[in-house]
Amino acid sequence: MTTQPQAPSTARMIDYWLGGTGHHPVDVAAAQAFEGAYGPCAEIFRSLRAFSGRATRQLATEGVDQFLVFGAGIPAQGNVHETAPGARVLYTDVDPEIVAAGRELLAGHPNVDYVLGDAANPGGIDPAALDRALPDHATRPVGLIFLGLAAFLDDATLARALDAMYDLVPAGSQLAFDFDAMELAAYPEALAMMGPGFHMREPADFGKLLGRWQVTADGIVPVADWRPDATPEQVPDAFWGGLATK
């Protein structure tokens, strides 16, 4: 992106926290303002990205070599195409500016594409783009990555979206998911910054929204505790998640 945006973007704020380069001063200012009300965020988002990496590697170990990523944001800093090199990856986001920035970053990467797509309407992804990027998506298992989005969808919309994702892919496909638990409720000023459309959920309640998806034996746990490579990161239990199978 060559022009300076006037408003911050959650995707670019996360890029800042992850140590990326796809953000602007307005995003840094917003990120620092949020930290003023909550506390440091970089380690929390790095822990979430590490969970994404572990889930992606697990799927790759099971033979999944095509991934559809919803709400991908800035696709840098250990994202799916870096974690599963050689896999086909289609990133999607609802923000055209983020998609354009992502396509710039991905230029020259084979088997990786980035297109407009709304996680609330998975069936609305351009069929031609889906066929081009993931030619076997209808016949072989797909890894769906749905991270950092559940908090921005109400229960009914989220349940419909997850059900549509289930219908979009064949049996054997898996969904990596997360959601914001209630941890932020202890920080009312920071919570107010998220706006009225921000939804936290009790871990015991989230499983009901998954519908037909079957959570693996790992269960729904704080993301730092999901199959950690070593001692789990010592971060707040802001994000919970897991893997679920069709």
Image (cartoon, helix red, strand yellow):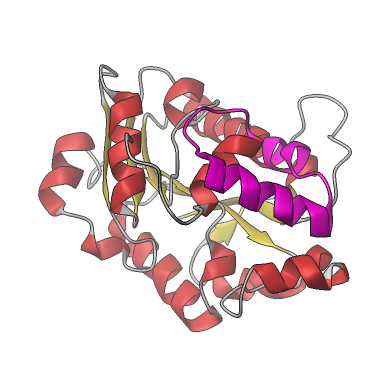
Whether residue 243 is visible: yes
Q: Quadrant of residue 121?
A: bottom left
Report the front residue among 207 and 128: 128
Task: Give residue 82's position: percent from left, percent from top.
Answer: 47, 21
In the picture provided, is 46 more to the left or to the right than 119?
right
Q: What is the magenta segment's predominant secondary structure?
A: helix
Task: Give residue 115's position: percent from left, percent from top.
Answer: 25, 45
Q: Residue at x 60, y 80 (%)?
A: 196
Against 102, residue 197 (above or below) is below
Q: Residue at x 56, y 60 (%)?
A: 214
Report the front residue among 186 and 117: 186
Q: Residue at x 59, y 31 (%)?
A: 53
Against 174, residue 17 (above or below) is above
Q: Which residues are magenta?
A: 18-47
Report the front residue among 238 and 132: 238
Residue 193 colored in magenta in the image: no
